[in-house]
Image: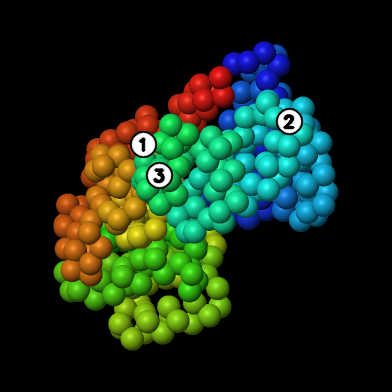
């Protein structure tokens, strides 16, 4: 790594909200903090627009500056910091203007932009696109997202490096794979009862996650597995809650479905262990961090095959990617449930997941890219 390397990481948020991009920001902050802590010649700072405080488990307090939504403060302090930095990493395309302003004052700075999925699949303003093409190195979350950048936005492949997401650094490979007794008791479930879960945000903007398709597949699956239960986990807005409940009632599956809403990270780990199957037939995943989270608990995963999901599942090593139709979903859920819950299989999935997506491997990759 370059002598006296200074790295500035600019984020919208990472600690005050939950979601895939926020998880990526936390993991990147942890990684850059770890790299700087282990080196006498690397210095790292994270400025966040919307966060107030950071979790000190991920980043040392003196390396983090939250601006609580104050755009002027964020702009001025980011530019002041960026003028003296070798590398500027921005977590989102919406931070491109600040990167441009820093580049005006610090021509030698390397600008890196993380790209995730839908935020760069859509149209990009011509001025932004020009700056990206001439001055930005992109770290793309997947080959799928890289292909879109090349084909849709005519960005040179040599300017795009694929950096897959990693598991949370505090995820442990040693956790039990058995179903948690407290959740079985809480929901009055038996140990042999088939359990399906999904984890995603739910709103009218998130229908492409495929939870409607999963609900519509249940009546046919229930004919073969009459005790099946489906837990839908994730924040859901009031309008969508009403719509989903109406759909559940119309399908006559109310006793088979529980909408849990937001679940803490501690409890979410338990629900992953409870599940026999993780199902999310999404069609617009840049990568699908939630799929590797599920696999890290040994869950068999069913995803769609139209986006980055297949890549996250290592093209079949961690789960099954299907052409998204109602018929295919019914067949695959039933097939997976017939195979039953096999501890050896779960352990194999978990071990493969940690081998591929550990934070240590991610850190080694980031350190190499920063050279």
Task: Give the spatial CA distance, label 2 vs label 3.
Answer: 27 Å
Residues tagged 1 and 3 counted as in contact (Cβ below 8 A): no
Residue pictured at 64% horizontal, 47% vertical:
96
Question: Where 230 falls versus 157 (above or below)?
Answer: below
Q: For the residues carrying marks 2 and 1, which lies nearer the camera in this image?
A: 2
In the rendering, at what x and y percent does residue 349 appear? 30, 39
Is residue 113 visible in the rendered structure shown here? yes
The alpha-carbon separation of the residues under discs 1 and 3 comes to: 28 Å
Question: Dot 3: what SS?
Answer: helix
Q: Which tag is nearer the camera, tag 1 or tag 3?
A: 3
Question: Could you tell me how many numbered marks the image carries?
Answer: 3
How far apart marks 2 and 1 lie (CA) works out to 40 Å
Residue indicated by mark 3: 150
Q: Earlier in the sequence, mark 1 or mark 3?
A: 3
Q: What's the mark number on residue 353?
A: 1
Residue occupying the point 19% across, 59% down:
332
Figure quadrant of residue 223 = bottom left
For the residue pair 1 and 218, the one nearer the viewer reads as 1
């Amino acid at each position: 790594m370059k002598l006296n390397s200074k790295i500035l990481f600019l984020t919208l948020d990472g600690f005050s909200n939950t979601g895939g991009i926020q998880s990526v920001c936390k993991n990147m902050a942890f990684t850059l903090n770890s790299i700087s802590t282990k080196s006498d010649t690397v210095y790292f700072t994270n400025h966040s627009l919307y966060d107030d405080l950071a979790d000190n488990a991920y980043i040392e307090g003196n390396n983090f500056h939250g601006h609580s939504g104050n755009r002027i403060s964020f702009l001025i302090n980011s530019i002041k910091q960026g003028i003296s930095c070798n590398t500027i990493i921005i977590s989102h395309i919406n931070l491109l203007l600040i990167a441009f302003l820093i580049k005006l004052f610090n021509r030698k700075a390397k600008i890196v932009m993380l790209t995730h999925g839908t935020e760069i699949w859509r149209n990009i303003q011509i001025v932004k696109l020009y700056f990206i093409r001439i001055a930005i190195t992109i770290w793309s979350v997947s080959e799928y997202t890289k292909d879109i950048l090349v084909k849709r936005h005519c960005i040179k492949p040599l300017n795009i490096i694929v950096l897959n997401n990693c598991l949370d650094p505090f995820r442990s490979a040693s956790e039990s794979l058995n179903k948690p007794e407290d959740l079985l008791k809480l929901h009055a479930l038996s140990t042999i009862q088939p359990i399906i879960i999904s984890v995603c945000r739910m709103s009218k903007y998130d229908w492409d996650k495929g939870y409607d398709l999963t609900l519509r597949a249940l009546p046919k699956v229930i004919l073969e597995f009459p005790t099946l239960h489906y837990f839908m986990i994730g924040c859901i807005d009031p309008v969508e809650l009403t719509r989903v409940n109406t759909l559940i009632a119309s399908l006559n599956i109310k006793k088979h479905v529980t909408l849990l809403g937001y679940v803490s990270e501690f409890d979410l780990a338990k629900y992953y262990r409870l599940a026999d199957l993780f199902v999310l037939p999404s069609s617009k995943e840049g990568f699908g961090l939630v799929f590797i989270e599920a696999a890290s608990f040994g869950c068999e995963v069913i995803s769609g095959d139209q986006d980055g999901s297949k890549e996250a599942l290592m093209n079949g090593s961690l789960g099954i990617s299907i052409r998204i139709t109602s018929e295919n979903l019914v067949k695959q859920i039933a097939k997976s449930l017939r195979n039953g819950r096999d501890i050896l299989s779960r352990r194999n999935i978990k071990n493969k997941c940690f081998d591929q997506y550990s934070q240590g491997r991610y850190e080694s990759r980031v350190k190499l890219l920063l050279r």
